[in-house]
Structures are given as C-alpha cells and as structure tokens.
Amino acid sequence: MTLLPERWNAPGSLVPVAATGLLLWSTFSSISKPNARGHATIPLAAAFTIIAALNARDFSTNDVVNSIFARFVIIYFSHSLFILGFVSSSELEDERRRWLITGSMRPGGAHGTVIDDQQVPNDMPGSSNYVFSYKVLLNPLCFGTKWEVPLREAKVGGGDSLATSSAHKSRNITLESHLRQRPLPSNIRDKALPKPKSRIVFILRRLFTLFCRYLALCIYFDRDLFFWMPGGIAENRDDYVLRGNHFFFKSLPCLLVGRCSSDAHIHAQAVRATVLRLHWVLIQVVPDYLTLSSYHDVLAIIGVATGVDDPSEWPPIYGSITEAYTVRRFWSSFWHLLIYRSFSTFSRSILSILGFNGRRPISRYMHNILVFFLSGIMHDIVPWLLTPDQCIKCGCNHQIWRFVLQVFGMMVESVVQFVWRELERWLFGPGVVRVRLYVAMKRYLGYVWVLFWLMWVAEQTYIPFTYCLAS
C-alpha cells in the first residue's frame, strides 16, 4: 500500500471524529452503569464503527495517521464486542466492585488481591462508573482484570531447545485457576502489588522515551534515508524477479558463498534484492513499533499526570526485541498483543461451534491460524479503506497470507526444536544445555532464523503486491 503524505478533504473531515465520539459514548454509557443489556449496545456500536472506518481517509491530512486511526477504531470495537458480548454481567459487576475498592487496574490485581467480607460503599460518586468504563474499554490487554494478558516468568519444556530459553517472560493468557476471586467486597490487603512508582519519575522517563522515539521517526521517515538503496530507490523487475525466478531460494545460496556467477551485474542485483527484502521486513516492523509506542506513551503521560491512572497501569506496549529468537516468541513476547484477548475469544468460540474444543495439537494450531487470520483481515481492511484504487488493481489480501504463514513458521520451528532436543540428549547428554556459550549460539541461530523467515514471508506476500503497483 502506498500512503500519501499530505491530502485534505475538509467537507468530510468531521464525520470520522463524530462517529468515533458516538462509538465511545455508546459503549461508555453501556458499561458505566450496572445492567444486563450490554448486548443491545453492540449493533449501535457496530454502526458507528462502520461509519468511522469508511470515512477514515478524511480523518487527517496524513494517510499514515489515518491508517493508525482506522486500526484503532477496529481494535476498539473488537475489544468492546468482547466486553459487551462475551463477558457476563455478573463478571463485569464483580470487576466493578473490586475496582471501586482498589481504585486502580494493576497487573495481577484480579488474582493478587485478598478481600475481606465487607460491603462496598453505597455513596460512590457517579463519575467513578465512567472512570471504570475508561479502565475497561480502553484496556485491550485487560490489565488488572480477570481477563488480563500478563507478562510473567515461565518455564519452557524443562530444557533449552533450539532458540528457546529455560526461563523467560512471556505474555500468556491467565489460567482459569488464577481467576478465582473471593466474594466481593470491601476492605483489601494487597499482598502482591509492587512498590508504587513515583508519578513525576514515570512522566519524565516517558517524556524522554517519547522524545527519542520522535527523533527515530524523523530519521525513519526522512526520504533520503528511508528510500536509500544501493544504486538508488528506482525499483525495476530484477528487484522482484531475478532471471525469471523468485529471489529467495534461487539466489541466496550463491550469495552466502560470495558470488552468484561470473556476471557482476547479476551479483549486484542479487545483493540489491537482498537489501530490498530486508528493507521490506523493517517497514513492516519499525513504523508500527515507533508509532504505536509513541501514542501509548502520550496516553500514559496524560493518564498518570491527571491522576486517573497509576504508573503501574501503563507497562510498555511492546516487549524486548531480544526475546524474539523464535517466530512464536516474536509474536508472543515482543510484538504488541492489543488484539489477542478479543480475537482469541472469537477464535475459541468459532472453533467450539465447529467441534474443535480439545487440547489436541490440531486444535491449538487451528486456534492460532484463526487468530492470525482475523488479524490479517483487520490489516487488509485498512488499505481497502484508504487506497481502494490500489486494492482494485492489485488486490489487498497479502496481509492475510503474511499473518497466516506465521503459524506455519511456528510449526517448522517446533519440529526443529524437537529434533534438536533429541539430538542433544543423544550426543551430549543433559549437561550441554547449561553451557552458556552453547545457549548463546542457539539464541543467535534463532535470531537468524526469524529474520530469514520474515524475509521469506515478505517474498511470498508483499513482493507480488508491490511489484503489481510498480508495473
């Protein structure tokens, strides 16, 4: 998708803003007071979402911002649908009463709090219910609730297999056994909450981080740097197809040994094609990482500065890139999980209807495929909204394949990890997995594997679409 940097269409610019405001109002009002008719709000919220999304092109003068806006609307509605359609009124009221006592949504709060048998105060101000709506609806990771997607220490498989460490932080869905709460409410003794962070220190740190991300975005979107390629950015057919064959499998082996052939031109084209594919991987990761993190920092600063939120309610939206040494960990430990709670719920409901409700491997992989498929649909909707002419010409289904293929990458690495683990036991015994140099070597192999996998996926999905636009 080619996004236009500047474009203005004043007559329709208020439509997406008004529709989004009505979407927020309808959902906030539904959650703000106890009722068992949240389902009735869903059609109204869906209508406002459709209006806002269809007019996303007119939200601002910058299509990059418009794409973020369109995704926000879709993600917000998806999360609202989860809260209004899949969470029972009794569960929601339990969370409301617990929040009225604790005053914040803290990670682990749903299962790290011991509650005595007293009653909730009856004189809570009406505004508290709207604050609760904000805490629940603008909280796609569900931090501090019984549905949260937490960061936590976890053991993996009893050993360190290929590109898998023995102890790591991963964002896993809270187990059902962790969701038990004592009968609510009222006086609480929080035994598991960390020491409160200073608001001033938190704000200053986030401001500094936001400034650094701003500089990085300025550098990234500088045309002289962003479009730099060996020999210039002017793309040609050889950038996509080399000697009539796709680049990845045909040209990579000879690049690794130094020369592709005696033809210097062919070698230069293969090197250029390699850099171009690395460029495509970066443009699928870097702008989203910097932009979404920046918006997240702005909202965190506002929420904490106004006193509405506690610093512990705003952990980083992304994990550490150093944890992304398998395809699975790239998506579970590094990438944001803003859509995982809602899309995972939708996936399990669909699979349950189809009869895939067990814990067999096929059910787990079907679940993963469906979650990534839903994510791909969301990402493909955005270019259809912003650049319909390009989609009519070249199709806009490459994002669906990009996401669904990630599951097959997970399958491949699972098989390799199993074989590698068995070879370790047969050749070296259990002691070798604890040798630090050996563990580091496997982790770096994992980084290389993830990079080449993402390049291969770009080869299969992004290249045909871009080549069509360039033709």
Image: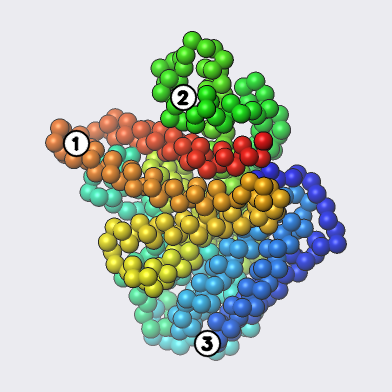
Q: CA distance from mark 2 to mark 3?
A: 61 Å
Going 60% across and 63% down the picture, which residue do you hit?
Answer: 74
In this view, 226 is above or below 384: above
Q: Secondary structure at mark 3?
A: loop
Q: Position of residue 371 (x, y in %)?
A: 45, 59
Question: Is residue 219 in view from this perspective?
Answer: no
Q: Secondary structure at mark 1?
A: helix
Q: Which mark is residue 440?
A: none
The amino acid beneath tag 1 is Glu
Is 68 or 353 nearer to us in this picture?
Answer: 353
In terms of sequence position, does the residue under pointer 2 or pointer 3 come before the other? 3
Is 179 or 276 nearer to us in this picture?
Answer: 276
- Mark 3 and mark 1 in contact (Cβ < 8 Å)? no
Name the residue tied to disc 2. 251
In terms of sequence position, does the residue under pointer 1 or pointer 3 come before the other? 3
Task: State the colouring used for the structure image.
Answer: rainbow
Q: Image quarter for residue 370?
A: bottom left
Q: Position of residue 383 (x, y in %)?
A: 65, 52
Q: Which mark is residue 424?
A: 1
Q: CA distance from mark 1 to mark 3?
A: 56 Å
Going 59% across and 68% down the picture, which residue do you hit?
Answer: 77
In the rendered image, the residue lying farthest to the top is 262
Name the residue tied to disc 3. 36
Q: Position of residue 440 (x, y in %)?
A: 33, 33
The amino acid beneath tag 2 is Ser
Question: Is residue 16 in view from this perspective?
Answer: yes
Q: Residues within 10 Å of mark 3 (few under 14, many from 20)?
A: some
Is 272 or 249 nearer to us in this picture?
Answer: 249
Q: Image quarter for residue 358?
A: bottom left
Going 67% across and 35% down the picture, which residue do you hit?
Answer: 471
